[in-house]
Amino acid sequence: MSTRSHLSLSLLLVILLPLVMMGCRTVHEADLFFPRQMPRPPAEAGRDDVILHTEDGLEIGGWNVRSPAPRAQLIYFYGNGETVTDSLRRMMWLAQLGQMDVLCVDYRGYGFSDGTPRIQSLLDDALLVFDHAATNRTDPHLPMLVFGRSLGTAAAHHIAAHRPVSGMILEAPFTSLPDVLKAWNRNLPIPLRWFVRLRPEASLAGLSPQPVEAIRTFEQPLLILHGSEDTIIPVSQGKRMYDAAGSIQKTWCSIPERGHNDLSLNLPEAEAALRDFLEAQGEAREKKKQ
């Protein structure tokens, strides 16, 4: 082998060795969260401040947007890196579209909530939020709906598995944490993608049930929205969640040319699907009254 060949091989090894040594990058629980904290904005008409206290003594807070004559109570769980403040316009739009009260509470470490985010606390606090909403809704007979986006879908279907919900809306749901990391791996630059494999730590990989398993037991009406160009949580994961769901009344809505963070609910396809879903909920409630 020539001197030039030896030099080229040595240079290649110097470049690639760190990547090869990185190999399987273990993703820890803290890596899954992107919290942003901020002070609570002043109170405004049309929304009620909500402050809840967790069993371990922390304070989590959010808002409940009130509708003049609500037909349902909706609990909204936002995506990673977002906050209640970021979600306010969505909450108000949903409240108007469905004539609903819409409640959203910041996750621990997000917005104006105390603490550090963890998966188990996200799930436990979701039940706390539901119980508060069910107890304090305008009418004790109002249907209870849950809406989860991205990370928030985990909280939504955890509630659906442990509390009596009338219907569930999921936007960009993921099938399992290992599947999410596989998608993240595909988003790495091509040279890194060849050598690096993201894998969950054992406690994450062993979470049970994973969402695609948990949704099999959900039998209430379901709507799933997913952007066709989503690279964070590919649309194939949303479709697998839809196919696995035990709901008899379920709707799949793929939004063309939209990704993970540019799917607006007032796009024609999304708005029509939401309107149909919420109107069906209202019709079901009227039938129960008769």
Image (spheres, rainbow, N blue to C red):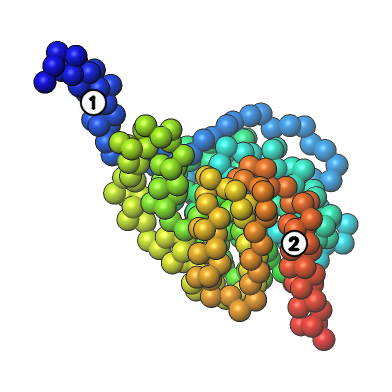
Viewer-proximal residue, 86 or 121? 86
Residue 193 lies in what quarter of the image?
A: top left
Residue at the front extreme, as displayed: 2
Q: Which residue is mark 1?
A: 17
Whether label 1 touches label 2, CB < 8 Å: no
The nearer-to-camera label among 1 and 2 is 1
User: The N terminus is located in which quarter?
Assistant: top left
Give the amino acid at mark 2: Leu
User: The C terminus is located in which quarter?
Assistant: bottom right
What is the CA distance from the residue labelled 1 to the residue labelled 2? 51 Å
Write the residue at 81% across / 66% down: 71
Q: Secondary structure at mark 1?
A: helix
* In this view, 4 is above or below 184: above
Residue 77 bears which disc, if any?
A: none
Q: Is residue 245 visible?
A: yes
Residue 224: image location, x then y, percent = 62, 62
Residue 262: image location, x then y, percent = 67, 43
Tell me if 159 is positioned left or right of 47 in this view. left
Residue at the left extreme, as displayed: 1
Write the residue at 40% across / 48% down: 182
Residue 272 lies in what quarter of the image?
A: bottom right
Write the residue at 85% across / 42% down: 45
Q: Is residue 101 visible?
A: no
Residue 247: image location, x then y, percent = 58, 75
Q: Secondary structure at mark 2?
A: helix
Q: Which residue is mark 2?
A: 274
Viewer-proximal residue, 117 or 209? 209
Give the amino acid at mark 1: Leu
